[in-house]
Amino acid sequence: MNEFDVIRKFSGLLPPAPAEVLVPIGDDCAVLRLGDGTWVAASDMLVSGRHFKGWAAPADVGYKAVAVNVSDVAAMGGIPRFVLVSGAAPDPEMALGVFEGVAEACGAFGVYPLGGDTTRADALTVDVAILGELGAAPVLRSGARPGDLLAVTGELGASAAGLLALEEGREGFGRLKKRHLRPLPRTEAGRAAAGLGVGAMIDLSDGLASDVRHVCEASGVGCRVDLDLLPVAHDARELAASLGRDPALLAATGGEDYELLVSAPERVLRTLAETVDIPVTVVGEIAGSGIDFRRGGDPVDHLSGWDHFA
Amino acid sequence: MNEFDVIRKFSGLLPPAPAEVLVPIGDDCAVLRLGDGTWVAASDMLVSGRHFKGWAAPADVGYKAVAVNVSDVAAMGGIPRFVLVSGAAPDPEMALGVFEGVAEACGAFGVYPLGGDTTRADALTVDVAILGELGAAPVLRSGARPGDLLAVTGELGASAAGLLALEEGREGFGRLKKRHLRPLPRTEAGRAAAGLGVGAMIDLSDGLASDVRHVCEASGVGCRVDLDLLPVAHDARELAASLGRDPALLAATGGEDYELLVSAPERVLRTLAETVDIPVTVVGEIAGSGIDFRRGGDPVDHLSGWDHFA
């Protein structure tokens, strides 16, 4: 049993959703009709020893907990608005550090904290629940169609490389470390993609190898992804090479880039690329029935991303 | 620095609240205008070793995490509607146990889970964020006025006595143990109180001694509480006596009863008592400037409730 099995079994225990729930548990966010507005909601928890280690300051952890939730809203095409934050720490000073990072992220992403809880715990733990507002129809994981191309925003591998640099105690590589500690969710790109009516969207939290599978399973389609096309960050390439790691595999499996993976017809992706001020790179296409990773034309097997109970 | 200092300092770091936020962080829930409706929002986290020990099954923990959040909504006079649930556990089977308890509580309290996250952690940890809907003006902590009486719903001390029975490994006392493991939030009474326009309301989570202080500080008033008037549960009295503990002190400081403390003029409280099908017991009055606990007419000093970082 893994994380996804737990959530799936939980979903099976629930009564029918109330009429206001337009999209239940299972996508990046649930979608909810409240009065005359449409809202998205999600929560994400970070735990010391699992999602971060001693190299992350409490403020980094608080910041990141907000950022990854903002990214879930971005992946629906929503505008992040409100958060609730619970933080547990070994002492109140560390808890305050967490909340300082939360406040900083709230300022950076334009979200407002409605409430908070704090308590003592051996392991620093932060859970954030987020509410975002939708200006267009939500973009689900299930809308990928044969003939769509798959594209990613920005660059991949920076977060995984930053994590390696932190784990290995490497000097320098400050940009990569920062991308890991304080991710940059793609809210603008997500809204632009929703406005253009892209087919499917997900944020790259578990890693492209996992997340493309989530999209294909939800959409009932297969895909082909060319690892040679991945826009691997130049400094991530450099760090990976210095550690004898394959940059493209790191970028495909490392996770936590919080870029967006978008499935849409080619002309829609072209318009998206012209609209946003970050790269939009085609990395594959929706085709066939399996998940087919290729490199130099050859299949690459056994690629997988993050499993929260592995 | 304690829990309340952390939240207070956090509040000081926040930008001005958006116009939709009618009541910011600091009460049982924040109050939010969303479209044509008014909503309340809160979050509460439970951590193993801090809020419960091995005597609580994972399903109990999940159930309680929902119940205590429902209680926060009840204390505003709201109708609990939606939750987001994050659960961390040493293995996926325990995580699933938590979510089974969450599902059971959601059924019992009529709330629907919009989303969830789960991950591995050494300590079982559950955080629930809740959204409730308001049908009347929210009841805040700050509305207690001189001349109001203070009343509590139901009975006090059952949860603290149940905790003692669990900690001491006592046979029997099943009702008390259940009241501790699976609290019964007072949603109906909270709605009735809000409909009657009571002055102030809070749920008794930290214990009457602490929670009456929160109301008085928020309202800028003092109070006198008569410990002889507390409606201590009969079996809680029995257990306390058998352990040489003072039942009234246990009821005043034990916490986690999740009954409601209401401040209102006498006639309003009388109507409330006639409206709801649980006892409503006057335990004191708003008067003076300090927190004055009495017993047989004599002052009782140094009463305090739960501090999450103590």
Image (spheres, coloured by chain):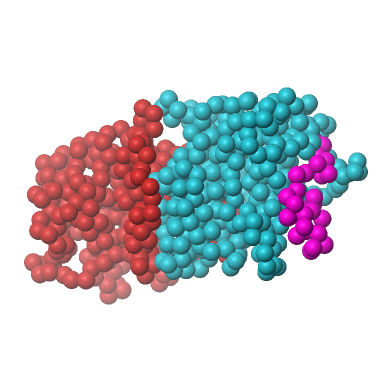
Chain colours: A cyan, B red
Magenta-span inclusion, residue A137: no
Residue B32 appears in the figure? no
Q: Quadrant of the C terminus of chain B?
A: bottom left
Relative to B56, A173 lies left or right: right
Q: Residue sitting at 68 percent across and 61 percent down?
A: A173
Relative to B170, A299 lies left or right: right
Q: Residue sitting at 42 percent across and 62 percent down?
A: A96
Residue A65 location, x and y as percent? 53, 52
Task: Answer above or below: position of A217 versus B294.
Answer: above
Q: Nearer the viewer, residue A178 or A90?
A: A178
**Range drawn in magenta:** A222-250
Residue B10 location, x and y as percent? 38, 56
Relative to B293, A254 lies left or right: right
In the rendered image, which quarter is residue A281 located in? top right
Residue B266 location, x and y as percent? 11, 45
Identify the residue at the far bottom of this view.
Answer: B244
